[in-house]
Image (tube, grey):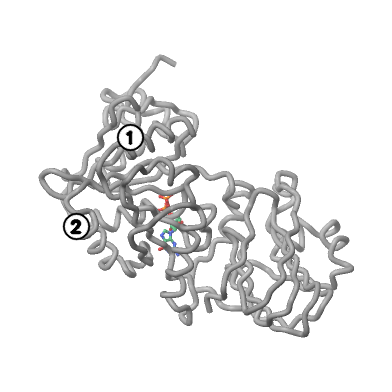
């Protein structure tokens, strides 16, 4: 195909992958002034849609941002901190201040203390080498916490541009669309622009006469659970509404399966409570540890689903990690949910597909 450039953002037009930069449906090629789907939607519906980038383009983008004088707003999905993390971000942001925005707070049980969530976000960011100026908790979908976040960003940007960055699926588009509706409301206020030296579409939302908020393309993080399962299964594991805790009293040598995607063995501990926070649609199955391997061999993809029988082949093997727990803690299965182990002096082994992260934190609830 001869090289065609998007009229809106300058990205090279391609017709293969709807989720990548520059996608246009083949029918659009007949038009004059071809635009990519992302620019088309922006122009006609005043709506942004996420697209993802190759690593190469992504590095160029980060370099651009690092070289500018701006506030960086990093959106994360609080259910998947590690999967939401952009590798290399601390190295490339230069001296620019960073604000961390934790999205999807509407899914947490009402009993969650937001300050504890914020503390945890700060700690995770610090462990990953990211110094943050402030932390906000929002639900872009429900509009929760959005005013506070918008005001915080306005104060912290001190008259500078703002770049909104995030991995795919964290809710970056929902966040920006909310702000567009809320603040501009004007059709023509938003344009796309691209950086010198790159062919990337950045959506440019003017904040005042001199400065803008830029929506940047989403970045794929290979550690996201989403990359290992089908779209249908993703719907099952992604919570749609407030999570209901499910409580199990477990003895030593008992095991829980979370669909066929994760597993928790109680190695040592006395008849404690294990409080599970996962999508309400994800089946939890309890068994004896001695039977667990056989159960998984016989039933993964069927009774233990997701994955389904087709996607089971692509799922990396479940890898174990053992935790010795001294105080009430959460075992976090990145992108899936967590289990609160209520008693100290407990040893558990948690399993998750290789490549996805398991971590431990002080209990949030
Ligand atoms: P992007 O890829 O980062 O632009 O993410 P999207 O804005 O497309 O959102 C990804 C998914 O998360 C969609 O299914 C959204 O409906 C959902 N989502 C976004 N924000 C929220 C939120 O605040 N709460 C919940 N429950 N879901 C959200």
On the rendered image, what quadrant is the N terminus found in? Answer: top left
| Residue 10 shows in the view | yes
Identity of the residue drawn at 30% across and 65% down: 146
Q: Position of residue 4 (x, y in %)?
A: 35, 20
| Residue 23 shows in the view | no
Q: Position of residue 99 (x, y in %)?
A: 34, 57
Q: Earlier in the sequence, mark 1 or mark 2?
A: 1
Q: Secondary structure at mark 2?
A: helix
Q: Is residue 305 left or right of residue 121?
A: right
Question: 58 or 189: which is nearer to us?
Answer: 58
- Crowding at label 2, few (<14), some or many (≥20) Cα neighbours within 10 Å? few
Furthest residue in direction top, as rendered: 2
Q: Is residue 249 left or right of residue 212?
A: right
Q: Position of residue 285 (x, y in %)?
A: 75, 71
Q: Is residue 332 left or right of residue 146?
A: right
Q: Which residue is mark 1?
A: 64
- Crowding at label 1, few (<14), some or many (≥20) Cα neighbours within 10 Å? some
Question: 76 or 116: which is nearer to us?
Answer: 116
Question: Up-down: is 342 above or below 121?
Answer: below
Identity of the residue drawn at 28% across and 44% down: 214
Hey, which quadrant is residue 209 in on the image?
A: top left
Name the mark on residue 92: none
Q: Secondary structure at mark 1?
A: helix
Label 2 C-beta lies within 8 Å of the nearest ligand 1 atom: no
Q: Which residue is mark 2?
A: 183
Identity of the residue drawn at 46% across and 39% down: 19
Quadrant where ligand 1 appears: bottom left
Q: Position of residue 247 (x, y in %)?
A: 66, 81
């Amino acid at each position: 195909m001869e090289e065609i450039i998007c009229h809106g953002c300058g990205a090279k037009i391609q017709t293969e992958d709807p989720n990548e930069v520059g996608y246009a449906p083949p029918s659009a090629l007949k038009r004059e002034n071809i635009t990519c789907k992302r620019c088309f939607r922006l122009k006609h519906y005043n709506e942004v849609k996420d697209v993802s980038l190759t690593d190469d383009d992504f590095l160029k983008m980060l370099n651009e941002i690092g070289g500018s004088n701006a506030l960086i707003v990093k959106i994360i999905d609080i259910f998947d901190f590690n999967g939401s993390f952009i590798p290399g971000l601390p190295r490339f942001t230069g001296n620019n201040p960073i604000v961390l925005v934790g999205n999807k707070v509407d899914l947490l049980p009402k009993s969650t203390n937001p300050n504890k969530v914020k503390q945890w976000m700060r700690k995770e960011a610090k462990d990953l080498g990211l110094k943050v100026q402030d932390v906000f908790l929002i639900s872009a979908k429900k509009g929760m916490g959005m005013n506070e976040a918008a005001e915080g960003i306005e104060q912290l940007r001190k008259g500078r541009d703002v770049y909104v960055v995030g991995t795919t699926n964290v809710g970056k588009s929902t966040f920006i669309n909310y702000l567009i509706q809320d603040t501009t409301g004007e059709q023509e206020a938003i344009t796309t622009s691209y950086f010198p030296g790159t062919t990337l579409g950045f959506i440019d939302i003017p904040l005042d006469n001199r400065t803008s908020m830029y929506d940047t393309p989403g970045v794929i993080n290979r550690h996201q659970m989403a990359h290992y399962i089908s779209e249908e299964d993703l719907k099952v594991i992604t919570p749609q509404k407030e999570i209901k805790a499910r409580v199990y009293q477990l003895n030593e040598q008992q095991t829980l399966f979370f669909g066929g995607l994760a597993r928790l063995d109680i190695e040592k501990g006395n008849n404690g409570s294990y409080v599970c926070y996962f999508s309400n649609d994800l089946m939890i199955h309890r068994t004896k540890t001695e039977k667990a391997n056989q159960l998984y061999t016989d039933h993964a993809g069927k009774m233990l689903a997701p994955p389904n029988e087709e996607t089971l082949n692509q799922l990396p093997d479940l890898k174990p990690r053992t935790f010795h727990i001294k105080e009430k803690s959460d075992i976090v299965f990145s992108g899936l949910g967590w289990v609160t182990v209520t008693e100290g002096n407990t040893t558990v082994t948690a399993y998750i597909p290789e490549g996805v992260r398991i971590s431990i934190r002080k209990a949030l609830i």
